[in-house]
Image: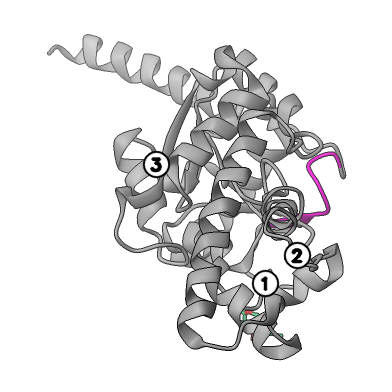
């Protein structure tokens, strides 16, 4: 290449570099918008699982109602069967049951019924979306920002929830990573690592929306900026790792520009830390 051509090329490159340095911040949107499902898209524990337990109790003639406050305490026990067992061990078993085998059989039966009732509630659209979710999803579709859901809950429940509550057109814009596609559940970052690989994303340029400390740790473990939208039963958790914490996506009008700014701030922080 001649000297003049080299100089011309250098000039062109300088112009390109100059232009890219002055791209208005309005165009710096996240590379992808990734939602957790339970507690983020919908308050599924409060509005889905809890009523399904209550319906199952009623169907079996068991005089037991878990209200919103009580259920919040019961959630300290992970797993539905374990939750019922711990509760009745404490307050006394229903239906006059005393034998261990009968207790196990009852809990097993109730859990199957409750799972069916939960899935029916999702398909029937009885569990509402949280405020701001649909607005943000529509904005992402309009701006062509890829959408994903990363959840270690049951895949069918997650897919049904997105399909029923958002409609088929939006559903088809989502990539859903859920259930047993990874071995290690959150707080391990595996599900987010999988999404980054499958969608060829730079983890530090996407934004994750989570509602719990466990989910937050998973996202940060994958190197992704994370906004926490508090849900009914997670509000008191430790979110010090979060890039931003809001009460809901309508709190402070979280839009793609706000999310893009969170990503840029996180990037410049990590660049400063790395320098
Ligand atoms: C919250 O989490 C951070 C980071 O994981 C930790 O350093 C801090 O000690 C925790 N704070 C409380 C009050 O547990």
In front of the other: label 1 or label 3?
Answer: 1
User: Which residue has dot 1 on it?
Assistant: 75
Q: Which mark is residue 233?
A: 2
Instruction: Calculate the distance from the C-alpha at mark 2 to the C-alpha at mark 3.
Output: 31 Å
Depth check: 263 or 177 in front? 177
Could you tell me which residue is drawn at 59 percent across and 88 percent down?
98
Instruction: Calculate the distance from the C-alpha at mark 1 to the C-alpha at mark 3.
Output: 35 Å
Label 1 vs 2, first from the N-terminus = 1
Label 2 vs 3, first from the N-terminus = 3
Q: Quadrant of the C terminus?
A: bottom left
Magenta segment boundaries in residue numbering: 244-250
Depth check: 51 or 97 in front? 97
Q: Are marks 1 and 2 in contact (CB under 8 Å)?
A: yes
Could you tell me which residue is drawn at 76 percent across and 49 percent down?
47
User: Which residue has dot 3 on it?
Assistant: 202
- Secondary structure of the residue carrying numbered label 1: loop
Could you tell me which residue is drawn at 57 percent across and 47 percent down?
36
């Amino acid at each position: 290449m001649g000297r003049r051509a080299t100089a011309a090329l250098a000039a062109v490159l300088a112009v390109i570099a100059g232009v890219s340095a002055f791209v208005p911040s309005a165009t710096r949107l996240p590379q992808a918008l990734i939602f957790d499902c339970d507690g983020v898209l919908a308050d599924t524990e409060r509005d889905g699982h809890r009523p399904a337990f209550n319906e199952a109790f009623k169907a079996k003639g068991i005089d037991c109602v878990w209200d919103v406050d009580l259920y919040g305490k019961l959630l300290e026990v992970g797993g539905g069967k374990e939750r019922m067992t711990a509760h009745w061990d404490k307050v006394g078993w229903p239906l006059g049951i005393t034998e261990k085998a009968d207790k196990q059989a009852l809990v097993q039966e109730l859990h199957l019924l409750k799972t069916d009732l939960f899935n029916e509630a999702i398909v029937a659209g009885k569990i509402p979306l949280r405020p701001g979710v649909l607005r943000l999803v529509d904005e992402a579709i309009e701006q062509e920002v890829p959408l994903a859901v990363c959840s270690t809950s049951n895949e069918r429940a997650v897919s049904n929830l997105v399909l029923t509550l958002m409609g088929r057109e939006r559903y088809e814009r989502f990539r859903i990573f859920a259930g047993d596609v990874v071995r290690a559940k959150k707080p391990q970052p595996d599900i987010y690592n999988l999404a980054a690989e499958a969608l060829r994303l730079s983890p530090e340029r996407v934004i994750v929306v989570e509602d719990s400390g466990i989910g937050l740790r998973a996202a940060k473990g994958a190197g992704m900026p994370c906004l926490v939208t508090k849900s009914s039963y997670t509000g008191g958790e430790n979110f010090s790792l979060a890039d931003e914490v809001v009460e809901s996506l309508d709190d402070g009008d979280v839009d793609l520009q706000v999310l893009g700014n969170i990503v840029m701030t996180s990037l410049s922080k990590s660049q400063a830390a790395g320098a």
